[in-house]
């Protein structure tokens, strides 16, 4: 997964490169805690910040959560002794307004899809505005069967990803405010009250 932040987008987000990297490092730590293997790095191209992620997991639900925030459908079925991946994702749900986003799936063999077939095992969608569907077999790699999702978010797409990740993190816990009542008349008091404002009873 590659995410690009042009300088004007960084300014719009009121974020510095350092704060972006801190947010991303925190998010990666959460992904790893869930069981994913994540490699990432940052680079610059002129004034554009580029973050590249390699996410590996045998858990398709976890991949869906990390890459598509649970907005895709990724399932596996056994057909003629081969494990097939069924993929479906509605592009405009998250990438609306983006003008340079691509999604690439790489597997062993593309059985069917409505994207552009780059080769026998790769299909790609560019700036898709609608449902993206594909059925593909897994690719054998070092004795393991797998498939790869390559998502490139540029411009607004990267900003939307950052905004959603930042707002999906757990909010800080606020200690509940204790409610106090007058021991004499039952009037609700502030926790710091020494006397009841109604009956004057000392608390």
Image (tube, helix red, strand yellow):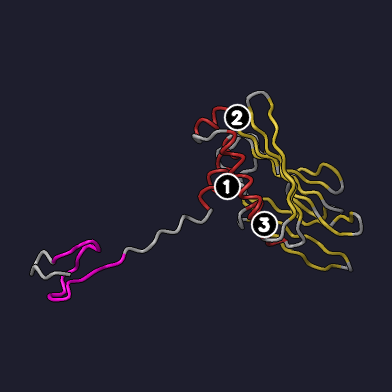
Disc 3 versus disc 1: nearer the observer: 3
Q: Residues within 10 Å of mark 2 (few under 14, many from 20)?
A: many
Provide residue 85's location: percent of width, then percent of height.
77, 60
Is residue 183 shown in magenta?
A: yes
Q: Residues within 10 Å of mark 1 (few under 14, many from 20)?
A: some
> Is there a contact, CB below 8 Å, between mark 3 and mark 1?
no
Res. 156 image quadrant: top right
Provide residue 54's location: percent of width, then percent of height.
75, 47
Disc 2 versus disc 1: nearer the observer: 2
Q: Which residue is mark 3?
A: 64
Is residue 100 shown in magenta?
A: no
Res. 201 image quadrant: bottom left
Q: CA distance from mark 3 to mark 1?
A: 13 Å
Give the magenta range: 178-195
Q: Which residue is mark 1?
A: 94
Q: CA distance from mark 2 to mark 3?
A: 26 Å
What's the mark number on residue 6?
2
Disc 2 versus disc 3: nearer the observer: 2
Provide residue 80's location: percent of width, then percent of height.
88, 68
């Amino acid at each position: 997964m590659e995410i690009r932040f042009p300088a004007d987008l960084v300014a719009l987000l009121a974020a510095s490169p350092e704060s972006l990297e801190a947010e991303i490092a925190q998010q990666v730590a959460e992904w790893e805690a869930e069981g994913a293997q994540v490699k990432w790095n940052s680079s610059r191209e002129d004034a554009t910040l580029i973050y590249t992620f390699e996410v590996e997991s045998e858990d398709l639900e976890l991949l869906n959560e990390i890459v598509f925030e649970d907005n895709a459908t990724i399932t596996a079925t056994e057909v003629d002794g081969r494990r097939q991946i069924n993929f479906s994702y509605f592009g405009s749900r998250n990438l609306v307004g983006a003008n340079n986003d691509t999604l690439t799936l790489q597997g062993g063999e593309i059985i069917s899809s409505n994207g552009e077939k780059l080769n026998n095992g790769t299909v790609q969608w560019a700036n898709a505005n609608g449902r993206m569907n594909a059925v593909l077999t897994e690719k054998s790699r070092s004795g393991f069967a797998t498939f790869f999702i390559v998502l490139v978010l540029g411009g607004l797409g990267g900003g939307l990803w950052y905004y959603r990740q930042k707002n999906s993190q757990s909010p800080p816990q606020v200690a509940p405010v204790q409610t106090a009542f007058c021991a004499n008349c039952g009037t609700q008091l502030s926790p710091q009250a020494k006397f009841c404002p109604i009956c004057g009873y000392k608390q």
